[in-house]
Image (cartoon, rainbow, N blue to C red):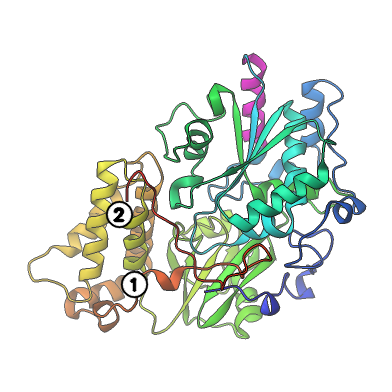
């Protein structure tokens, strides 16, 4: 599914006061790359001073509007300032200055936000990266990105900056795999070229790129940091980017107020608000939950209802779409795109994918009703990356919110699940941006290339 820029509103209607403008994440002219002159004319790159002590610089950053409440936008929603301060403490006793990384790998099949920012607002991301680097005294930084057009846009932006910055910024071509954006996989890739998660501890803030304390922040997080430093800035984290797809509509990229009721988004996106939907929320990681109109679109709000906002994507499922089939599609994706290094993860993802696929035509004597709850309870924390956790969470939401559908499958099967169309079966869950000037070929739905290290 290709995002249509002509049909993609870049903010919600004015009921909530958010329109596309210079102060927003998507900017006043969506899908047009912003130049350095355009960005600096709006007050960009004002906060790169390295004057004062390390503590002074860090407090200046912490004092930007909303920074104290900004949660990371990579999916885990970890408090950004806590992460920055941890690296600062590690750097105080380390033999080498810290390293800062803008993580734009975006292996999530249902999200395009990071690629959008790097393609069309690279100076916003670089401003956030350089602001944090200045606060920490980092002399080197990386933009870690898989998308070819995004890499070209970032390199063009760095050329426009020239030698006006104190930090050396490297653009690193990340592997286009699901796990390449996991924090320890990022550090390992930058150090060794191999994008595989590692056991924790140590964490990157302790031992990161080439042994230095390393801060890895999602590119949207860095964009929020930069926005908080602009004149007349809104508080960092007041909005978030949401890739909305499904329900027979073209995917759209929205900038939404944090805490917006889901019903308002449904009214904007579909023209109606009703209870006939489910939503695969937070990408493949956040679970399958009913599309309650009063669901608060924030990390805390979605967590209270048993799901996760994750990377901010929402894939809408309108009846008669089968949630069991979607769960089977997602786990089949995990079985194909895990890191290929943990035997338990590889075996469990493959086994669960096969079992969910069987529910279309259940085999006699197989204890499905026992297996699914057992996997949902036992998989958490069982791998170096979060793939087992994601599968467990998906199963929990399936069993908790869709028990009648699961029971019907066990009793009589399901025509939708029994006849899967398309190869790969998760192809309907892939979203991509239209080609840019650097990609003159016809845009196709994106499927990450499997890692060379395994399936």
| Residue at 42%, 84% in the rendered image | 319
Question: Secondary structure beneath disc 2?
Answer: helix
Q: Is residue 236 magenta?
A: no
In this image, 26 relative to 368: left or right?
Answer: right
Q: Quadrant of residue 260?
A: bottom right
Specify the segment rendered in magenta: 81-94
Circle 1 Cα neighbour tier, 10 Å, few/some/many (<14 / 14–19 / ≥20): few
Give residue 376's mark: 2
The answer to whether residue 206 of the structure is visible from this angle is no
Question: Secondary structure beneath disc 1?
Answer: loop
Residue 107: percent from left, percent from top: 50, 54
In this image, 290 relative to 43: left or right?
Answer: left
Give residue 6's mark: none
Q: Residue furthest front?
A: 440
Residue 240: percent from left, percent from top: 67, 59
Q: In the figure, 185 relative to 347: above or below?
A: above
Q: Quadrant of residue 341?
A: top left
| Residue at 47%, 39% in the rendered image | 185
Label 1: which residue? 423
Q: In the figure, 131 relative to 435: above or below?
A: above
Dot 1 or dot 2: first in sequence order is 2
Q: Is residue 84 magenta?
A: yes
| Residue at 24%, 69% in the rendered image | 357
Residue 354: percent from left, percent from top: 22, 63
């Amino acid at each position: 599914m290709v995002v249509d820029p002509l049909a993609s509103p870049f903010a919600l209607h004015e009921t909530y006061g958010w329109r596309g403008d210079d102060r927003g994440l998507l900017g006043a002219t969506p899908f047009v790359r912003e130049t350095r002159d355009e960005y600096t004319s709006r007050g960009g790159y004002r906060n790169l001073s390295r004057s004062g002590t390390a503590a002074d610089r860090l407090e200046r950053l912490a004092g930007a509007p909303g920074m104290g409440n900004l949660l990371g936008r990579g999916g885990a929603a970890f408090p950004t300032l806590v992460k920055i301060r941890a690296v600062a403490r590690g750097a105080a006793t380390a033999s080498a200055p810290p390293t800062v990384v803008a993580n734009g790998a975006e292996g999530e099949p249902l999200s395009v936000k990071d690629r959008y920012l790097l393609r069309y607002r690279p100076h916003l991301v670089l401003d956030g990266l350089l602001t944090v680097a200045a606060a920490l005294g980092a002399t080197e930084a990386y933009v870690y990105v898989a998308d070819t057009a995004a890499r070209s846009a970032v390199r063009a932006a760095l050329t426009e900056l020239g030698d006006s910055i104190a930090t050396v910024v490297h653009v690193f071509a990340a592997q286009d795999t699901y796990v390449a954006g996991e924090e320890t996989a990022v550090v390992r890739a930058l150090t060794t070229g191999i994008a595989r998660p590692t056991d924790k501890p140590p964490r990157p803030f302790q031992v990161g790129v080439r042994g230095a304390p390393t801060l890895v922040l999602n590119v949207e997080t860095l964009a929020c940091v930069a926005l908080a430093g602009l004149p007349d800035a809104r508080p960092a984290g007041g909005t978030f980017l949401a890739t909305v797809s499904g329900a027979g509509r073209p995917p759209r990229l929205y900038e939404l107020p944090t805490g917006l009721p889901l019903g308002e988004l449904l009214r904007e996106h579909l023209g109606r608000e009703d209870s006939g939907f489910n939503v695969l929320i937070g990408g493949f990681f956040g679970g399958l939950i009913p599309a309650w109109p009063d669901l608060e679109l924030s990390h805390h709000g979605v967590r209270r209802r048993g799901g996760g906002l994750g990377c901010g994507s929402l894939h809408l499922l309108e009846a008669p779409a089968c949630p069991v089939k979607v769960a089977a599609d997602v786990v089949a994706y995990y079985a194909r795109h895990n890191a290929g290094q943990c035997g338990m993860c590889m075996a469990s993802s493959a086994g669960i994918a096969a079992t969910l696929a069987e529910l279309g035509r259940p085999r006699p004597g197989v204890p499905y009703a026992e297996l699914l709850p057992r996997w949902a309870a036992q998989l958490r924390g069982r791998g170096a990356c979060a793939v087992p956790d994601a599968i467990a969470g998906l199963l929990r939401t399936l069993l908790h919110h869709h028990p009648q559908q699961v029971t019907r499958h066990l009793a009589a099967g399901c025509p939708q699940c029994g006849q899967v169309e398309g190869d790969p079966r998760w192809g309907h869950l892939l979203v991509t941006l239209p080609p840019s000037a650097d990609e003159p070929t016809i845009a196709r739905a994106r499927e990450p290339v499997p890692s060379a290290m395994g399936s």
